[in-house]
Every structure is written in structure tokens, then in C-alpha cells.
Amino acid sequence: MTETVLTFKEVALTFETEEGPVKALSGVSLDIPKGRILGVVGESGSGKSVLALSTLGLVPRPPGRYGERSSIIFEGKDLLRSSEKELELVRGTGISMIFQEPMSSLNPVFKVGEQIAEAVELRILRKELKQARSISLLESLRGVKGIDESRVKEEVLEILRDVRISDPEDALDRYPHEFSGGMKQRVMIAMALAAKPSLLIADEPTTALDVTTQAQILSLVKDLVREFEVSVLFISHDLSVVSEVADDIAVMYAGRIVEVNDVRSIFRSAKHPYTKGLLNAEPRLSETRKSLESLAGSVPSLLRVPGGCAFHPRCPLVFPRCEKEVPELLPVGSSGEVACHLYHGEKE
Amino acid sequence: MFDKRELIPPFVKQWYSTMKLVQRQRLSYFGAVVALVFVALSVVEGVFGSAILPYNPITSRGVPNLPPSILQWPPKFSHIFGTDPLGRDLFSQVIAALPLDAEVAFVVIISAVLIGMSLGTMAGYRGGKLDQLIMRVTDVFIAFPGIILALAIAATLGPSLLHSMEALIVVWWPKYTRLARGEALTVKNRPYVEAAEAAGRSSSGIMLRHIMPNIISPIIIYATLDIGNVILNTSVLAYLGLGAQYPTPELGRMVFDFQSQLFLQPWLVLVPGIAILLIVLGFNLLGDGLRDALDPRSSRIIAAQSSAGQEGA
């Protein structure tokens, strides 16, 4: 068995709303092995982002409520049962996150250099000075005692070089609005990696960027992940983007994992009809087709998830059992797991 | 190659471009000039004291014990606003009163902004019970008529300039708390705040570095247009005898002292009265201009109108 960095165990999350409970996640179990990139794919509203936010304890409770048996284990600790204080120490030190909107994820009133320096200082404070706390109010104005400013500056420059920002010396003194989207996303990646985390969560980091920048950022992420030896939870709605970076892929639908496998197997022999549908909806350069196939219907509202397999109203291969019984995520073939009645017989 | 202007923090730029727009509206421009003259006179007078005044504002011009009819002069060349019944030069008194009003206004505004911004940011960012507590207390203060509360506090503490300042601070902070809370609520949901949370910043650090710097510009602008109101209320307290005490020259106090002379020597009341009017009007006009300039829709209209005007000329 390979070492796992993060384990989701039967994570169920319900939001209490005025219209009734919304089941954002129902029984998600996943492992992220050390040093690997796990891509999570799904349509909007399938629960990808909520999964990421759960990991950092950023889901507001209430209205969010986790199931009794849910747990998210990171470094031996259950993050769902940690105090706010403990979570604060995990965030930015153990787990970092890159967000969807690089345009507005940087504070407009501080220079880029200062913002990265803060992340570096936080890491030195926690990992080297072994002080389990955040930077205090006064320290954020005057600097932290025991941390050499010139060393912090050196590290900031180094990390800017790592994310391939040309002329890092100049970039230090610039404000975020002077940067392009791609540059900002590089800065965000720099801030996330400055913490030298063991897990990096990337929530659709390339969605807001144009295609060429997207490709650059993706290859950058891939290189840096090897260099910094971090595991990654990479979230995207775009199967081709995920296949570009990920080692393994988990496909989500209506708050559940429907299929997990390594990238190759997913592309060669997808099992779940939903995964097949997604793959058919991708344009391919090798084939000439008149029109792309699309999945009929749309993602069900999480207020009213269909009974049985949530995908059955849209599934081309639906049969009576699908409407009654929720399929479990079980191993199939030589690798991978799938939650579909086509592959698993009746329970004995 | 490298443009130094890009090093100016955004909120300074915003303030500057706002002021450019204010300049294009004639009335607001007048207001801005009055406000500027007031501040400049106050600073100069505050630094140099009565040394730069034509006469000492507190001591009598003439020999004491002379009958008032000889001491009290109507406006003439050597005393442009005349003298009061004790033979003191009115012009010198009015100028001497300016730094006092400026000081009160700035102390009150700055204290109110500091208190309001800290409480408002906390209420807006933390939310929950703390928010409820802070905002309900704020509501109570806002529900109470401001000037009456200030009067009550000043009267209880005893009449003096310091006490009237304290009273005004107590009345003034709730507005800023509300304003700061509203702004904090919008900034709180910006992605960089979420990013800071995800990066393990403490909530106090997030408030100081991510919320406050991003809500300060509307607060500064609101405070600028609020200065006139503070001066007016200072004068009201002084007029009612709860502010600066005799013989400290203060505009409201002077109106009160000389009101018995209204029909005999009207300039004694009119000069300090008009001074108050000008200052308050100036700041209010400036404030109106600021508000128009800050509203994105009307700021475009101002820009369009003034450029059309320039083409016509």
C-alpha cells in the first residue's frame, strides 16, 4: 500500500435551506496517495468545490452539516472534528489552496512581494520556529521577531523564479492590478507553494484563463508538484484539463463519486455510462465527426436527487434496478472502482 | 521604463481622481476652496498663535475702564469687522477661533472613524452574535437624536471644550460603525479574503490586512464631507454654553455672547455666524461633489459635460 496524504471517509454534507435539505455530498470516500495528482471531474453542482472547501474546514456550519460517520483524515487528524484553532494551523501550512479566480484572489492594496512574503513568514514561523500560531496583529505590521527579512526576500524571489515569472525583482514591487491573469495565477501558485504544504488543492485554477495560458499554467503545476513533492487534489469540470495533469481521476455526479481510475484506464476503458458520456462530449483531433454528442438532460437539483442511481434519468443504459437501489463504489477489473449496477451483480 | 506613478497605492489614486472630478463642478469647487482656506488658516494660526494676528484677540484694544461707547467701534479700516463692547478686535477673534474648530472637527472625526471602523469591521467580518451585539448598541445610539444626546453628555460632564468633544465622539461613532460594517460585508466575500482564510491567516490578521485597507476609501470620503456637520454641532454646543468657555474665542460662543447686540451692532453676530455658515456650506458642497464624483454613473455624466463644455469654449 502506498502512503496516503488525505483520506475522505463517507463524507456526507447537507445544507439546510429554506426549501429543504440540499445534499451537496453523499458518502464520498477517496484516498489521495502521497506524491500523486488526483483529478476530480464533474459538472457544475456535482460537489467538487464543496469537497475542496471541506478539506480546509471552510464550509460554514450551520447551514452545512456533516454526516455522523463522515471524516476527513489528514496527518492522522480528523479535520471535520478539529477546532477552528487547529484548522487554522493546517491551512496554509499542511494544505494550501489555489482558487478559481486569480483576478480577484489577490488583495488589491498590497504589493505582490508583500503578499508572498506573508506566506513565507507564516511557514518559517510554524515549521522552523515551531510556534503553533498565526502571525499576530502587531507582527503583520512590524514583521515577526526572529525572522530575517532579507532571507524572506530571498525566498520570495526564489519562489517567483520557480513559477517562471520573468524579472522577479520588478514583480516584487508591483500591485496585483498590474499583472495579467496568467501572471496572477502564477503568483497565487507561488503563495500556495511558499508554505511547502504536503497537499495542494487546486480548484479550477485555469478556468478563468485563455487556452494558451491554461496550457502554461498546467505544465507549471505539473513540474512544480514533482519539484516540491506535494500531493494534489485537482478540481475541474474539464476532463481534458484534468487528463493533462492528473495521475488518477475521480468522476463526481450529484454529490457522489461514480468512477475512480488512473488516467489511462479512464480514457481507454471508461466504465460508468456518465464517464463515457463525458468522454464522447470531448472533441478529438484524431476523429472527424460532424457534431459532438452531448448528454441529454442536466444535472439534477441537489434538493431533489433522483432515487436509486442519481444518474438513471439521463442514463442510456438504464434498467429497472437503477431506479430502486443506490449503486456502491466497488472495484471492477484490474484497476479502478465504479458505482454502477451494470458491473455488480445483485447483493447476496 | 519604470513608471514611478505605479507605486502610488490605489486608494490615493482613487482620492486624486475623485478630486479631479470634484474640480469640474463649480459649486463643489467653491466648497473645496473654502474648505482648503479654512484648513490652511487653521494650521497657520494654530502654529503661530496670536503673533500673526493684527491684534490680540483676548485683550482690549483701548485703555480699560473707558465707557463702551468709546471702546466699541463699527467696522473701519483698522478694524475691518469692528470691535466688541470690550474693545477687542473682532477679526482677530474670528481668526483665532478657526484652529479651535478645526481641532475639534478633526479629533472628533478621527476618533469616530477609528472606533467605528474597528467595531464595524469586527461586526461585519465575524458576524453572528458579536455582529448582533455591536449593531444593536449602534442602533440605540443612532435612534437617539444626536444633538440632544450630545447636550446631555456635555451638560453632565460639565461645560468645557474637551467635554464637548467627548460628547460629540459618543454621538458620532455609530454612523461609521454602520458604514464600515456594510463595506466589510461586501469585502468579506471577495476571493482574496477566502484565499487568506485558506492560507491560515488569523481572523485579526485578515481584518487588519485584508478588510480594513479595502474599506478605507469610502470611509475617508464620507469623513471628509462630515467635517462640516461636526463644526456645526460644536458651534451649537458652544452657543448653548456647553463648549469652549470664556474668554477662549469660539465662533458659536461669540454668537451667543453678542446676540444681545444683534440690533445695535449686527456685525458682531453676523461675522462669526457667516463664518460658521461658510465653513459648513463649504464642506457640504465639497461633500455633494464627492458623492456625485464617487457614484460611477454621475461621475461619467460630469466628465462628459465638462469635456463638452471645453469643446464649446
Image: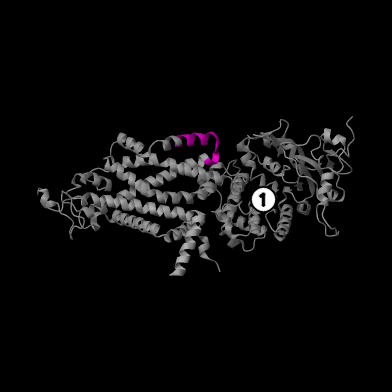
Can you give x and y, in whole percent of width and height, for residue A229 in the image? 73, 50
Q: Chain of mark 1?
A: A
Helix, strand or loop status at disc 1? loop
**Does the magenta stretch mainly form a helix, a strand or a loop?**
helix
Residue ranking furthest to the front: B312
Residue A144 visible to an observer of this rendering:
no
- Asked whether A245 falls inside the magenta stretch, the response is no
B132 relative to B32 in the view: left or right = right
Residue interval drawn in magenta: B124-138
**Taking A194 as reference, is A85 above or below it?**
above
Q: Position of residue B39 (x, y in %)?
A: 34, 55
Q: Quadrant of the C terminus of chain A?
A: top right
Report the amino acid beneath label 1. Gln
Residue B208 in picture, x, y percent from top left: 52, 46
Total count of labels:
1
Asked whether, in this view, residue A144 is left or right of residue B277, the answer is right
Left or right for A12, reference B61: right
Q: How is the image coloured?
A: one colour
Which residue position holds label 1? A100
Q: Residues within 10 Å of mark 1 (few under 14, many from 20)?
A: many
Q: Farthest residue in the left direction? A: B66
| Residue nearer the viewer, A100 or B254 | B254
The residue closer to the viewer here, B61 or B306, is: B306
Residue beneath the point at 30% across and 55% down: B47
Taking depth in this image into account, of A99 and B141 the one nearest to the observer is: B141
Q: Quadrant of the N terminus of chain A?
A: top right
Residue at figure coordinates x 51%, y 50% from the top left: B213
Residue A80 x/y as whole percent: 68, 35
